[in-house]
Amino acid sequence: MHRHLASVVPELFEDRAPAMAVLSVAGSLDEDERPVLPPEFNWRDYTVMLLHVAAEIEHSLMVQYLFAAYSMGGPQVPEELREDVRGWQEVILGIAKEEMGHLVTVQNLLTVLGGPINLDREDYPWGSDFYPFAFNLQPLSADSLAKYVVAESPSTWSGPEATAIKERAAKASGDYVNRVGALYSRIDAILKNRDFLPDALFHADTLPYQASWDEWGRGYTRGERGQDAGNVPDVKSPELLVFGVFSRDSARKALQEIGEQGEAPALDEQDETSHFNRFLGIYRALTALTEDEQRLVSRRVAQNPVTAHRLNESEPVGYAAAEVTTNPITDPVTALWGHLFNLRYRMLLTDISHAFLLSGPVDNGGVLTGRGALVHRAFGEMYNLRALAGRLVELPLEENVPGGLLAGPPFEMPYSLELPHHDHDRWLLQRDLVQASRLLTDQLLNTAPASAGDPYLVALRESDRRALEQIEHVLSRKGCTR
């Protein structure tokens, strides 16, 4: 991606400071100006590449927001702040859920253009200059919040407060923080031009394979963002946006809705629906506390926990001026929980990817179809990740280090996100993952005294047993052949 982007925006690679201005150009194109097509591409292929970058950004932001939210709370939070902290946590979890909707909608955009879906994301130490900031799993703090505010900010955000937060974000990330909206502006500038993308390139017949709101909007009432969430006073429920795409207009509408949910249209501070305004509100409230109080909002969770030693674990890794260090989980029991978290994370990504290869309804006469089973299991994995993260933020990073750092969820990417070509083999992969989960669960139950008889692990093992029965049934069907 560096190779391709350097030919379009060389300023990005001479000095990173102008990146914001350069990437924002597409959002303010005059009628006679045109986006630049890099060598080795035509317009469709270039658009697919940009959508791949967009998908990875949405995935990266979602994971970083989840980690920050999971780190919040704990017995160290002063009694008078606990209600506020719980509310902030639910707001950030809601934003992360909405990012999942953005990620799925970008897959629909890729599908309608005939491109491969992409559920990959930035990981240490790799990076691309379209990313807002270097990928970094951090407990919530004013520094990390500053990065989130700037990443979600509109291009028109300015003034003394904006300058101060942008400077803080740059210092915290070790680099200039880019706006996510700049990339979507560039994609829209291409989509709206029929000379670049003729109408025939938008394949409406892919709609049955795309994610729909009826499937993925489970638990959310369409159009009722702003209603009370129910479990935390004064916190509004998230609104999951999942748009099917079948034409140029529907593609641009999807991008516009995603952009508006991230940024506040016309900087309307009364609009509480945007990620920008929600993060900015938490930032203002957090920075109004004393520094000692700010440190108590989150647990002492290690940054970037990993389940295995890296060859360069003692060296900072990252890109440009950013310094990102990993923290190996060396407590053996905690490491098992970390491996189980990574496996369920992989299962979530596999379920989503697999569902995009199947068409049709989620159920047939009240019986789940293969696609319906995958969507159902994806939701189950989302709950599993929250439950496992809740354990990991309470477990020690290192063995026999009283008062040391806590672990936190590692969110490590699998060795591959590619699915087998044949449907039969894809279900074999599903079986492999469930069997691997059972091995880890049994190991925790049988060899870790602190986990023996753990109710969650017992329930997870039973859930895996039912999943295996379902997968074996699918594999036994005559239609599921090579």
Image (spheres, rainbow, N blue to C red):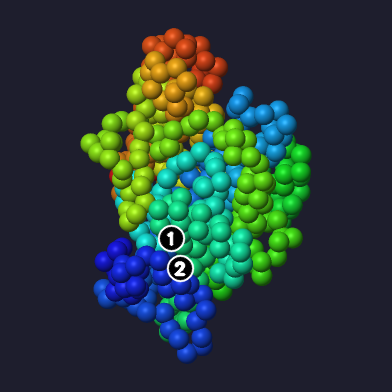
Q: Residue furthest bottom?
A: 32
Dot 1 falls on a residue whose secondary structure is loop
Read off the residue under disc 1. 176
Find residue 230 and report its horizontal and vertical position in percent: 75, 39
Read off the residue under disc 2. 20
**Is residue 158 rendered to the left or right of residue 21?**
right
Q: Amino acid at mark 1?
A: Tyr
Between 211 and 302, the one lying in front of the other is 302
**Is residue 4 rendered to the left or right of residue 354?**
left
Q: Quadrant of the C terminus?
A: top left
In the image, residue 104 sits, relative to residue 81, either above or below, namely below
Between 391 and 297, the one lying in front of the other is 297
Q: Amino acid at mark 2?
A: Met
Q: Gap between marks 2 and 1, in whole Å? A: 8 Å
Dot 2 falls on a residue whose secondary structure is helix
Find residue 122 and report its horizontal and vertical position in percent: 38, 51
